Image (cartoon, rainbow, N blue to C red):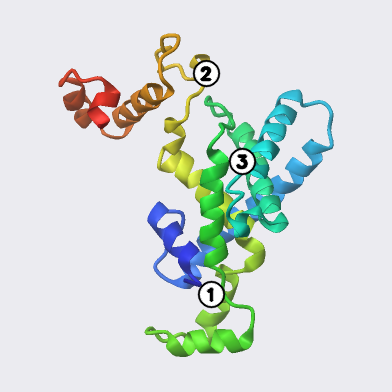
């Protein structure tokens, strides 16, 4: 479990190397990017010139305050602070990339919270005695050089940065952002939905639109069946 976050990063394709040292080489630039953008987010929070970002930050704070309040590990001050940092950096990164979709949708905070738990669980022990016990129980031999790499990979002070890395991959590489409703004018390929159409139908249609991008042949075959998206997904 101390390396759980690394497993998720491998699943998402965030780290592509074959050895712990290569994983660290993949991850260091992303952590440095997070630290740089966090400074930008904090400076922006003190500025009064960006009203749109201020509105989104207010929404983020409201969402974080009620996010999984029944879970003690996520309702503590440290976890909520980390969640705010992750989502504030997401706003900065989104603006830097000039993406067409909406910067933040309600529900992103829940994805971020799950990724935060993954990273909190995947933290290398700081207690030398606990580390020795872990290494002794490992089925794979861990030498001193690998141990130093694992310490850096599983740093507790990198939890927020790694959470952000996983969230970005989940939203844009795995295309979960397509599940969230955005304004019609921000998505040129979207067809404006009829007034009063259920949100679930809108989101289901966005899944099929995402399928066109990643597997156009499959999307063409599916669309030839003539089923509405929400019926198809049932």
Cβ–Cβ under 8 Å for marks 2 and 1: no
Q: In which quarter of the view is residue 153 placed?
A: bottom right
List x then y, in percent, for residue 30.
58, 54
Disc ID at residue 150: 1
- Residue at the (41%, 59%) spot, across then down: 10
**Direction from residue 199 to residue 79 in the image, left or right:** right
Residue density around tag 2, few if under 14, some if 14–19, many if 20 or more, within 10 Å: few
- Residue at the (71%, 35%) spot, across then down: 57
Question: CA separation, marks 2 and 3?
Answer: 19 Å
Mark before the other along the chain sequence, 3 or 1: 3
User: Which residue carries the number 2 mark?
Assistant: 183
| Residue furthest front in the image | 70
Residue 89 visible somewhere in the drawing: no
Disc ID at residue 90: 3
Residue 140 visible somewhere in the drawing: yes
Mark before the other along the chain sequence, 2 or 3: 3
């Amino acid at each position: 479990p101390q390396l759980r976050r690394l497993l998720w990063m491998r699943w998402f394709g965030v780290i592509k190397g074959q050895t712990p040292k290569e994983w660290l080489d993949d991850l260091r630039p992303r952590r440095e990017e997070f630290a740089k953008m966090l400074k930008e987010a904090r400076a922006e929070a003190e500025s009064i010139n960006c009203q749109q970002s201020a509105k989104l930050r207010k929404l983020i704070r409201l969402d974080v305050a009620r996010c999984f309040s029944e879970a003690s590990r996520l309702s503590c001050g440290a976890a909520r602070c980390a969640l705010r940092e992750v989502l504030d950096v997401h706003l900065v990164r989104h603006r830097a990339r000039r993406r067409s979709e909406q910067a933040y949708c309600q529900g992103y905070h829940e994805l971020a919270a799950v990724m935060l738990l993954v990273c909190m669980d995947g933290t290398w022990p700081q207690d030398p005695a606990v580390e020795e016990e872990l290494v002794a129980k490992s089925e794979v031999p861990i030498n001193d050089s690998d141990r130093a790499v694992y310490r850096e990979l599983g740093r507790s002070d990198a939890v927020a940065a790694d959470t952000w890395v996983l969230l970005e991959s989940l939203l844009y590489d795995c295309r979960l952002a397509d599940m969230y409703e955005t304004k019609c004018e921000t998505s040129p390929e979207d067809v404006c939905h009829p007034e009063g159409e259920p949100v679930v139908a809108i989101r289901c249609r966005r899944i099929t639109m995402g399928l066109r991008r990643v597997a156009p042949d499959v999307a063409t075959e599916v669309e030839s069946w003539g089923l509405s998206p929400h019926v198809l997904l049932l």
